[in-house]
Amino acid sequence: MNAVLFEALWLSIDCSGIDISILPFQVHVKMADEAVCVGPAPTSKSYLNMDAIMEAIKKTRAQAVHPGYGFLSENKEFARRLASEGVTFVGPDTHAIQAMGDKIESKLLAKNAKVNTIPGFDGVVKDADEAVRIAREIGYPVMIKASAGGGGKGMRIAWNDEETREGFRFSSQEAASSFGDDRLLIEKFIDNPRHIEIQVLADKHDNALWLNERECSIQRRNQKVVEEAPSTFLDPETRRAMGEQAVALAKAVKYSSAGTVEFLVDTKKNFYFLEMNTRLQVEHPITECITGLDLVQEMIRVAKGYPLRHKQADIPINGWAVECRVYAEDPYKSFGLPSIGRLSRYQEPLHVSNVRVDSGIQEGSDISIYYDPMISKLITYGSDRAEALQRMEEALDNYVIRGVTHNIALLREVIIHPRFVQGDVSTKFLPDVYPDGFKGHKLTDLEKRELLAIATSLYMSYLVSQQVEVDGMKLNVTSEWNLASPLLSVTIDGTQRTIQKFTRDTGLNILKYFSFCLFLKYKLRILTKLAAELSKYMPEKAVEDTTSILRSPMPGAVVAVSVKPGDLVSEGQEICVIEAMKMQNSMIAAKTGKVKALHCKAGETVGEGDLLIELE
């Protein structure tokens, strides 16, 4: 929302914002001319509470509403209620929202507009039994997904009957929670595709443009993590064909505003319509970078009734842009399970050239269990892809985040991975590259020596320049050693490195060393010779046996508990369901046994590491 507010304020438009009771000091609230609280933290009582938001609109006498990226941004009833009050909705009209927001109806419209579509069932799936029957008819694997909404919520891949039943249950629950609509559809799952989307822009005068593509294939749990524009995969002919089909669909529903038509593209460059998002996408800044258009400004102009100022021939591809979604997540757990906490220190890398950071938080902000865990969108731009990626690497190195676990280690690993650098990506990139999960970066012998040399020099930081010997190799280390700064610039044998220091205790240094180590935290003990000799007599803490217990891997709310004390459970059986940041996660037993004790119940909030169940 900050990008929307910034643009509106730049256009000299008075702005009002909405907030919630537990987060009254959000950045967008400070930017706005005024703000109205619309309720407590749960989305159903605040950001999805249409009555409260309409009351805020009346109270502030707002003449127009920009809905942002989520919540009610694709809700036709909200747009209808605004229209009935004479308030302009900065987005498409209710007809287009209904047509494209409903994946079942949008697929039928896409077929009629001669847009390539994925084979599947073109109706609403009534229950789990029908889901299984339809999946068998289509042929596994299938994709079960919410008819309303998007953003990866309410989506499950099923490879058999059991997964179809489970997917139907979780998808319908997530869809109801996120969009207030639990209708589902099922279609053929195209294995190993690319996810490429076309940005469209249309006005109320029958003009429509396609603003090139965005490559969004790096995903986890069907949610985008790294995006770039343009795509390394598309040739001019395929790009034009996709763009023309996207515009044809927009015109078929008389679309007016910025929107995105998403496609799956196979290895032979066949492309299939996936869905249309009738709102501003999170990743829109990379399109702005390569085209020079300000999409928020264009949305406001269209909503006011102005015609588009550009023709299709005016839309360029200038340079390359990359966006990394920085999440409050632990990337070592399923590529990113949510983390909560307070940002005790926060410093964006805005000193790096051609870097843009869109965020709604600041130092001291709380990351809660109620909302999407995104901290920011980090965007870099270059004259070509190599330059944009080099700037992204530098920006990630210089991004300071304390107080919550985050995914920068994963992001940095992705953007320098040989497959990604070569453009060899698909929606299965993460599980293909890290089949056993993300483990971080393995240091080479030289990297290990350099890290140890820097840590030792930091321990002796009263000396500006030092020579450190590690395993027989002498390394010269120089720095100003400003220990008050979270970022330290270090020169080692003439090469500049950037590190982040977390804590420095007596004999203990904990560093982040970026040049090779990919934003990993390394715990290093720097000891005198005597202390090192004595340390071998210190007892080590025993590792906890987790086979007979189940701990929560993330903070969240317990949605359901499936067992009770005395029940016999099998390995892999569901014990409970935890919802964190609008995603539902099934917690399963690690072994077969009898339930000895339950330590949670439906409706309770649990923290990361909290004990959920004990088995005999």
Image (cartoon, rainbow, N blue to C red):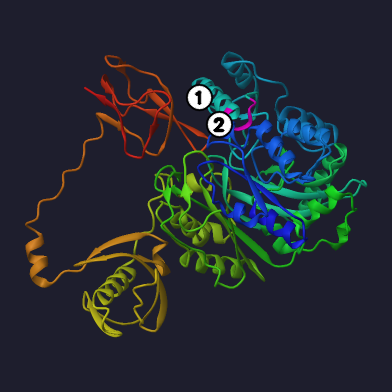
Taking the spot 75% from the left edge, 50% from the top edge, the residue there is: 199
The total of numbered circles placed on residues is 2
Nearer to the camera, 609 or 233? 609
- Residue 548 lies, with reference to residue 448, above or below; the image says above
**Residue bounds of the magenta highlight:** 177-181
Number of the label disc, if any, that sits on residue 382: none
Is 311 left or right of 373, judged from the image as shown? right
Nearer to the camera, 185 or 254? 254
Picture quadrant of residue 254: top right
Q: Main secondary structure of the magenta part?
A: helix
Circle 1 — which element? Answer: helix
Residue bearing the label numbered 2:
157
Taking the spot 64% from the left edge, 41% from the top edge, the residue there is: 70
Residue bearing the label numbered 1:
163
Is 372 left or right of 512, judged from the image as shown? right
Can you give x and y, in whole percent of width and height, for residue 279 in the image? 72, 44
